[in-house]
Structure formats: structure tokens, C-alpha cells
Amino acid sequence: MYNCECEEIASREVLMQQIMELKFSIIELGLYLNTHPCDMRALYLHRDYSKRYREITDKFQRVYGPLTIDYPCNKWRWIELPWYS
């Protein structure tokens, strides 16, 4: 049981790290695109990272609970686990 619990925590931390990295990249690319709106590579990366961000946040929220208040759920889970931001 201990190994299972440790693996779940590690998996949750890996997903959370990926979410934070993608969010950072999306924000930075958005700032860059404010001054370089025709940079096709940056536009492609922004679209790609945004898609991956949606996929990974959906996966995280299905397994571990909501990251934000606007995630649809069948059960109010805010008080069950620590919050992530």
C-alpha cells in the first residue's frame, strides 16, 4: 500500500509540474506574440502548448479533482484534497 500511495503522489506531482511548465510557456509565448504577432513558429507553439495544457489539465482533474472552480463535476470535491494553483 505504501508504494501505491507514493506512486500516486509522484504521478500527481509530475502532472502538476507539467501543467505549471505549460502554463508558463503559454503566458511567455503570449507576451512574445504581443510584439511579434507574425512569428509563425511562436503561433504554432502557442497553439500546441495550449492544446496540451487543456489535455493534461483535464486528465489531472478527472483523476485528482478540480484545479479551478469552473471545472464541471458531479461531486463537490474542494474540501477533500489540497488545492493546486
Image: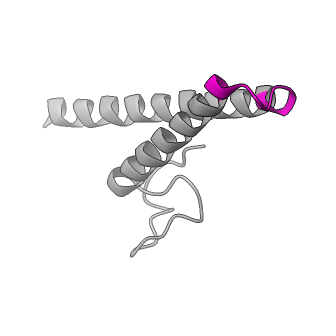
Q: Quadrant of residue 47?
A: top right
Lateral position of residue 53 relative to residue 38, left or right: left
Which quadrant holds residue 14?
top left
Residue 65: x and y in percent read: 42, 56
Compared to residue 10, the image places residue 8 above or below, namely below
Camera sees residue 33:
yes
Q: Position of residue 7 (x, y in %)?
A: 23, 31
**Which residue is depicted at the point 17% across and 35% down?**
4
Looking at the image, the residue that sits furthest to the bottom is 74
Q: Tell me the chief SS of the magenta region.
A: helix
Residue 10 in the image, given as x and y percentages of width and height: 32, 28
Q: How many marks?
A: 0
Foreground pick, 82 / 40: 40
Q: Quadrant of the N terminus?
A: top left
- In the depicted view, which residue is nearer to us: 25 or 45? 45
Camera-side residue of 29 and 60: 29
Q: Is residue 9 above or below residue 65?
A: above
Chain part drawn in magenta: 33-42
Asked whether residue 68 is drawn in magenta, I would say: no
